[in-house]
Image (cartoon, helix red, strand yellow):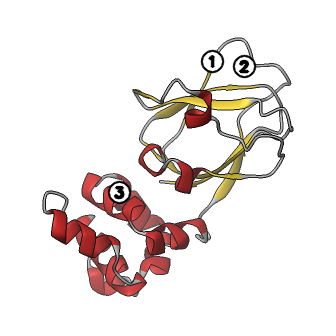
Amino acid sequence: VKANETASATLAGATSAVMGKAVAVLAGLNPDSYADMAAVAASQTAMAAVINSEAARTALVSSSDARKALKASSLAVEMSLVSSDGQYWNSAGTKTMRGLILYTKAGNTDNAFTITKVDSTTLASNNNARNAATSGSTGYKDWLEAFPNSSWVLSSITFYAYYRTTKIKYIPC
């Protein structure tokens, strides 16, 4: 599917039911076990299989229905990244993790949270391309929509942050 442009485009536009079954197949799971994308996104077993399949990961971030189901997943948890104010402002912090980043939050309106690396991939050097917070806001930034190709974390993220309220919301896999 990934190598075939037509098949890839068809899958990206598939309904939630079709996408859920397709992702299950791509992840090596029984598609009859998953009614739709919501079922895949709510299953720890399915998400553990998906993160181990590049084709399944690519399919998920390529589909707006799949991204919507992932953002509504009951498996999503919030995690603080900084244990004390100023901890990683002058030097990078690293968080060992494995999962899908859905949202990011600086927790302060000065926008002091930037993810610079996902696993071994350095994100663009332009601050607007890698900033993990919405300028002037303490709310969550939709990371999955802004950076779908940098949302799957297989081992760690590297970041600069300042406040204890710096958080991510993600699905651990």
- Measured as percent of width and height from the top left, residue 122 is found at 44, 26
Residue 55: image location, x then y, percent: 25, 57
Helix, strand or loop under label 2: loop
Location of the N terminus by quadrant is bottom left
Q: Residue at coordinates 38% horizontally, 86% vertically from top-left?
A: 17
Residue 9 seen anywhere in this rendered image of the structure: yes
* Residue 88, disc: 2
Q: Residue type at mark 3?
A: Arg
Q: Which residue is mark 3?
A: 57
Residue type of the residue flagged with mark 2: Tyr
In this rendering, position of residue 156 left or right of residue 142:
left
Q: Which residue is mark 1?
A: 92
For residue 29, say whether it is visible. no
CA separation in Å, label 2 and label 1:
6 Å
Labels 3 and 2 touching (C-beta < 8 A): no
* Residue at mark 3 to residue at mark 1: CA–CA distance: 27 Å
When asked about the image quadrant of residue 165, the answer is: top right
Type of the residue with mark 1: Ala
Q: Residue at x 34, y 83 (%)?
A: 33
Q: Residue farthest to the left? A: 4
Q: Quadrant of residue 87?
A: top right
Query: Which of 83 and 134 lies nearest the eye of the viewer?
Result: 134
